[in-house]
Amino acid sequence: MVTPRRTAAALLLAALVALLGVVPDAHGAIVPDYQNSPTSTNAFDGLISGTDLVNAGQPSFSSVVSTVAPLVFPLPQINDGAGGSSGAFWDGSRLPTTVTFTLDTGINLGGYDITQIRSIAGFSGNGQAQSNQGFELLTRAVGAGSFVSHGQFDNVPFTPGSGMPAQASTMTTLTDSTGVIASGVEQVRMVLIDHGYSSGTWDGSFYIEVDIDGAPTAAAPVIPVSSYVYDGSGPGSQPSTSPAFPDTSGIELTDGLFPTSTAFGDSRWVGFRDDPPPGPGGISHPQVTFDLGAAHELDGALIAYLHSTTQAGGTITAPEEVLLSVSDDGASFSTPVSFTAEFDHSGGDQVRSAMLDLSGFTGQYVRLDFHNSSQWTFLTEVSFTGSPATAVIPEPVTAVLVTLSLAGLVRPLRRRIAERT
Ligand SMILES: [Ca+2]
Ligand SMILES: [Ca+2]
């Protein structure tokens, strides 16, 4: 069955919120630390990191963009590891603006655990007003369609005025009570606010540097596959491989071995084609069902395939669609879910991997139904990540529910019993 993970727990938590006014907070609480110097632009420059996740040149950094371009002092200086006047400046007419850092998820497919975010602002001349800073922090996890807000953090100690010192700086450091602000993160977004002193030369904020610290999110464990079959029970699906490119011993898809080249003749490829070939508008349509040995809460699937434009007349291509369904008993399968965007049809000859997001799927059996309008589909590896299915209700919640049931349910029942007697 397709059972959204923790649905029962979520419902119970919602009930608790309604009953007790408890606000569940899966990620703990952000711990902000606000500091400032009323006398120095460079008070915090010594803390600037040149090796944080978003520092220019780090392999974990992909890009930074802003919805409104800074004035004179350009955006790339916000993550260049340098202090002094190396920063990005938005005057009041350019605020609010949204700055989005994108982390590289080509290597670290699971995204990053964000442990600390530090923003340093400061300037000389009219430094105090432009050292004030404030932003809303948001993050987006790999595969998530939207951002999650973690709150707004204002560090606005200075009131502009004629007596303002020429130099000043502020530093906002955000950590989390759990140690991790967010997990599986692909993008970090800061909506920089206008702190309100927008008259004349006192307006805007000068951001010297933003450092984002963390580490790659640990990948979910790979689930050992007990066995798999080419069952061919789907409409038009094929019950076996092509005799020319067989699955030797029936283990080639899960033996962890990849072809050493893109040549389709490599024995580590398992090939499928429409039969009899070449069928007009033919399909290459294998269907494979994997037995994971026991029920698992799935996290993801990796499917390694061949895409070739130069061999066999360009008839070996990425699948156009994979339908995925799960089952607890190997007989009754869930309604198939379609994956298309994960398969790359661009460019030339490559061994490619598609990563399917399977969060929310639970089952012992996973069925993949490949659709391909090309003559051939070539596969080499399929693997799944996740963990054994367990009870989903956390202990503390269970304990509270027991208390609630005693207080809220048992007593009325006793009362009704008492009223009847
Ligand atoms: Ca940096
Ligand atoms: Ca800088």
Image (cartoon, rainbow, N blue to C red):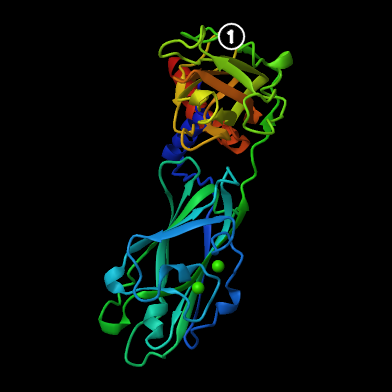
Snapshot quadrant of residue 57: bottom right
For mark 1, give the secondary structure: loop
Q: Estimate the x, y position of residue 417 in percent, counting from the top left.
A: 48, 17
Taking the spot 47% from the left edge, 8% from the top edge, the residue there is 236
Residue 45 placement, left or right of 144: right
Is residue 208 positioned above or below 7 on the image? Answer: below
Pick whichever, 386 or 237, lies toward us. 237
Q: Estimate the x, y position of residue 395 in percent, counting from the top left.
A: 62, 35
Figure quadrant, ligand 1 = bottom right
Is residue 374 positioned above or below 309 on the image? Answer: above
Any part of residue 294 in sight: yes
Taking the spot 53% from the left edge, 19% from the top edge, the residue there is 376
Pick whichever, 195 or 269, lies toward us. 269
Snapshot quadrant of residue 176: bottom right
Q: How many marks?
A: 1
Taking the spot 48% from the left edge, 34% from the top edge, the residue there is 344
Residue 64 placement, left or right of 382: left
Any part of residue 365 in sight: no
Queried on whether the Cβ of the residue with tag 1 lies below 8 angstroms from ligand 1, the answer reads no
Q: Estimate the x, y position of residue 111 in percent, counting from the top left.
A: 56, 47
Residue that numbered label 1 is attached to: 231
Residue 307 placement, left or right of 253: left
| Neighbours of disc 1 within 10 Å: few (<14), some (14-19), many (20+) | some
Q: Estimate the x, y position of residue 193 in percent, counting from the top left.
A: 35, 66
Pick whichever, 230 or 417, lies toward us. 230
Disc 1 residue type (three-letter):
Asp
Taking the spot 47% from the left edge, 86% from the top edge, the residue there is 38
